[in-house]
Image (tube, rainbow, N blue to C red):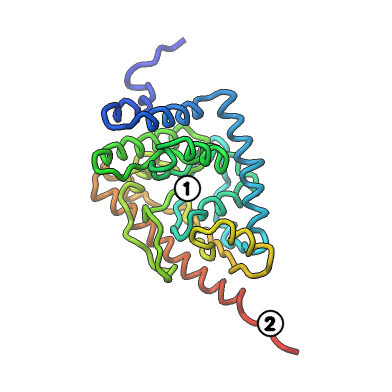
Amino acid sequence: MLESTPATRLPARPDLLAAGEQRLGFMERHIIALVRRTFEPGPTDRAIRFLQHWIGSTWIHHFTKNLRYVFGLERLPRLEPRQSYLLVSNHRSFFDLYVVIGHLVRLRMRHRILFPVRADFFYTGPLGLFVNGVMSFFAMYPPIFRERKKLALNLVSLDELAWLLRQGGYFCGIHPEGTRKKDDDPYTFLPAQRGVGRVIHEARVPVIPVFINGLLPNDLARQVTSNFDGTGRKIVVVFGAPIDFSDLLAEPGSPKVHQAIADRTLEVIGRLGAEERLHRAELERPAPTA
């Protein structure tokens, strides 16, 4: 048997718990440790993959199926089970990525699903852990911190996300804007955050862009009701082909390169938004009268 050498060994998984030993609270440490362990190969990971695909995607499908219109599927690559993928999307609603990735799961995408999520609430108490487990089956990982004293930990979270993607078999949805855009214009975006560029540069996986429009911002009950009572606004999803970053990936990683990568994601998503506007106009055109 050949012995591994330092030159051929895979890099160690970035350790958020070790990095945050003096900064994370009691509940944060324990919840992160619990969710983190679910990614270790074995029965727990297999069970979570099953639940994400056969239960999580099912309720998303039925709660949006009467409103959802999807375009651009022919542009998608063949989603190989052992390859990881990163999906980049605009951010208008808490449910954007659930709907988009839920649709891909219905098309037999079989990867374990990841969504980076704000640490407050989801990693600070039992209720957040419960919601993460029940609504997404622990897809909401890794945590992203907003407190000033913990901001440095976000680099470790992003590096761990890139590490997971490099292992293969993961499908991660991420918002280049970093937070929701809350005004009335879905076709303009907040500035791109270079963290997504850092992940793309380190992970080296296919990056799939998508634009989604029509979801309610944060009212799950009304969103579900509108799907069944005929009052809902059409949810239009437009996929693009994988983004070519070859020129930027050839450069050494730096804040400038990471920002350029992040900016490119929003440029492509913006072009998909222009397509969505045309599709929506066609869908909402009044039927001709006899």
Of the pair 210 and 35, the residue shown nearer to us:
35
Residue that appears at 64% across and 61% down:
225
Looking at the picture, which amino acid does disc 1 mark? Gly
Residue that appears at 61% across and 30% down:
47
- CA gap, disc 1 and disc 2: 36 Å
Q: Choose top left, top right, bottom left or bottom right for residue 161.
A: top left
Of the pair 144 and 134, the residue shown nearer to us:
134
From the top left corner, tell me how far across and down residue 84 is, in percent.
49, 39
The residue that disc 1 covers is: 173
Mark sitting on residue 287: 2
Q: Choose top left, top right, bottom left or bottom right for residue 201.
A: top left
Q: Left or right? Give the position of 106 relative to 128.
A: right
Any part of residue 83 in sight: no
Q: Secondary structure at mark 1?
A: strand
Q: Left or right? Give the position of 105 relative to 132.
A: right
From the top left corner, tell me how far across and down residue 236 is, in percent.
56, 65
Disc 1 residue crowd, few under 14, some 14–19, many 20+, Cα 10 Å: many
Task: Examine the rendered structure and indicate whether residue 230 appears above or below residue 93.
Answer: below
Task: Examine the rendered structure and indicate whether residue 43 appears above or below residue 253.
Answer: above
